[in-house]
Amino acid sequence: MKKNIITYLATAILVFASFSSYSQDHDRSAPAWVSDKGYWVVETNIHQPLQYTIRFYNNENTIIGTKDISGKKMNMKRRRVKMQLKSMLEFSLAEWAVQNPATGNTGLAQKP
């Protein structure tokens, strides 16, 4: 009887130790093609496979710009294509920031 209790106790300790090690938080960093300034959406049509519409948004879900690409096949699973979209997004965000410098805080730019 005493051996059974020791066996059950050892099993319980082992189970609790495995649960605590399984529940550790892992650092899941974002891939390199994910921008922290905004995101993009690619629209395609099955009837026109070589035509893409890319819409760029900032983190406030405001549309920043649109780019139409036609006559060229884009494989969205490739890292190079995603990195190019990231650079296009950041360029569009920089242009938009120059054109709209005080969006959201219009009262700060006015004199009393």
Image: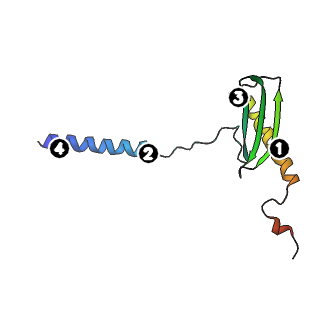
Q: Which residue is mark 4?
A: 5
Q: Nearer the viewer, residue 37 or 3?
A: 37
Which sits earlier in the primary sequence, circle 1 or circle 4? 4
Q: Position of residue 108 (x, y in %)?
A: 82, 68
Task: Please state which amino acid type lies under the numbered disc 3.
Answer: Met
Quadrant for residue 89, please give it. Answer: top right
Name the residue tied to disc 3: 76
Which color scheme is applied?
rainbow
| Callouts 3 and 4 close, C-beta under 8 Å | no
Residue at screen point 73% across, 33% down = 43
Foreground mark, 1 or 2, reads 1
Q: Along the polypeptide, which appears first: circle 3 or circle 2?
A: 2
Residue beneath label 1, please?
Answer: 92
Q: Amino acid at mark 1?
A: Ser
Q: Secondary structure at mark 1?
A: helix
- The kind of residue on which mark 2 rests is Ser
Q: Are marks 3 and 1 in contact (CB under 8 Å)?
A: no
Q: Nearer the viewer, mark 2 or mark 4?
A: 2
Neighbour tally class for label 2: few under 14, some 14-19, many 20 plus, Cα within 10 Å: few
Cα distance, mark 3 to mark 4?
58 Å
Q: Dividing the image into 4 quarters, which one contains the N terminus?
A: top left
Question: In the visual, does 33 lie left or right of 1?
Answer: right
SS assignment at label 4: helix
User: Where does label 2 land, which residue?
Assistant: 23
Residue 3 image point, x, y percent: 15, 40
